[in-house]
Image: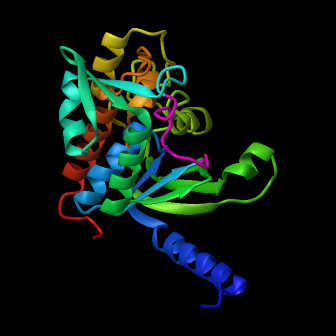
């Protein structure tokens, strides 16, 4: 068999562009490919939603890969054990209610499950702004991650969606754009992104699920972005709350969009 370099290049360019164009108009756009974003993408896609997930980094997975201080293990508490079983993630019980999983396996399984379910992931792309129509978030303003990091002025493109999920982690980047650029008040005690508190795993894990909600028309906040928005605690390398937050965010959207999904 002969291999032609131009044919290889054309195959990559054509398939990528076809997919990108198809997924510029979706049910749900997720920014942030960490545990809550991937979990939401998986649940949404397997329940019939058309989902685009973008992440500015080359490798998605957020903070999972490094485990705790580069010891590549994570903990999931009893409340999240069912999700480990659902995702077929290897784990064992360290002691009562504390389950240990390999962070590499967790990240790989989340990515595989989400993409196999039909979510489309575009890495090295970030949301530099939001589309807001009539006081509702209606999509994302996209640019290449390296363009933003380099500070070059290159005009963006746009993705339209019925819902957006801010799963950007500690910065709560989309909500910060909404409050600072639009002057919008979000459904938090301060009306803004309060900023996260120092570590308290018990309260942080509890709050991350409670804080997962629609904080402005069209935008759901999940994961550490939810705790940053509401001023709750960080929790370190325990991930049950992150997974449960992603699942809750997906469920809120599925209930809202029942009967109107694109697939």
Q: In what quadrant of the picture does the N terminus appear?
A: bottom right
Residue at 69%, 87% in the rendered image: 4
Image coords of residue 252 (percent x, y): 24, 43
Q: Answer yes or no: is residue 220 visible.
A: no
Q: Quadrant of residue 142?
A: bottom right
Seen in the picture, residue 138 relative to 234 is either above or below; the reply is: below
Relative to 207, is 130 on the left or the right?
Answer: right
Image coords of residue 177 (percent x, y): 58, 38
Relative to 17, is 81 on the left or the right?
Answer: left
Residue at 52%, 27% in the rendered image: 170
Seen in the picture, residue 217 relative to 170 is either above or below; the reply is: below
Image coords of residue 59 (percent x, y): 56, 47
Relative to 31, is 156 on the left or the right?
Answer: right
Q: Answer yes or no: is residue 183 visible.
A: yes
Relative to 102, is 18 on the left or the right?
Answer: right
Identify the magenta region.
56-66
Q: Between residue 129 and residue 49, name the one nearer to us.
A: 49
Q: Between residue 173 and residue 105, name the one nearer to us.
A: 105
Seen in the picture, residue 237 relative to 182 is either above or below; the reply is: above
Q: Main secondary structure of the magenta part?
A: loop
Q: Residue furthest bottom?
A: 1
Q: Quadrant of residue 245?
A: top left
């Amino acid at each position: 068999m002969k291999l032609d370099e131009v044919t290889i290049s054309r195959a990559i360019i054509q398939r990528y562009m076809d997919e990108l164009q198809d997924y510029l108009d979706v049910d749900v756009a997720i920014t942030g490919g960490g545990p809550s974003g991937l979990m939401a993408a998986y649940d949404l896609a397997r329940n019939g939603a058309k989902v685009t997930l973008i992440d500015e980094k080359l490798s998605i997975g957020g903070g999972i890969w490094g485990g705790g201080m580069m010891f590549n293990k994570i903990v999931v508490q009893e409340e999240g054990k069912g999700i480990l079983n659902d995702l077929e993630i290897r784990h064992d019980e360290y002691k009562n209610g504390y389950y240990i999983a390999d962070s590499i396996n967790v990240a790989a399984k989340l990515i595989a499950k989400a993409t196999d379910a039909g979510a489309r992931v575009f890495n090295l792309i970030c949301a530099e702004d939001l589309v807001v129509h009539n006081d509702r978030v209606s999509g994302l303003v996209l640019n290449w991650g390296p363009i933003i990091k380099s500070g070059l002025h290159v005009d963006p493109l746009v993705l339209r969606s019925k819902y957006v999920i801010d799963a950007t982690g500690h910065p709560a980047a989309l909500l910060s754009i909404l409050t600072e650029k639009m002057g919008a008040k979000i459904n938090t005690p301060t009306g803004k992104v309060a900023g996260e508190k120092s570590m308290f795993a018990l309260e942080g894990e509890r709050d991350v699920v409670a804080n997962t909600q629609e904080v402005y028309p069209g935008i759901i906040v999940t994961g550490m972005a939810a705790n940053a928005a509401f001023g709750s605690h960080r929790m370190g390398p325990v991930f049950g709350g992150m997974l449960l937050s992603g699942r809750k965010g997906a469920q809120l959207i599925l209930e809202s969009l029942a009967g109107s999904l694109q697939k």
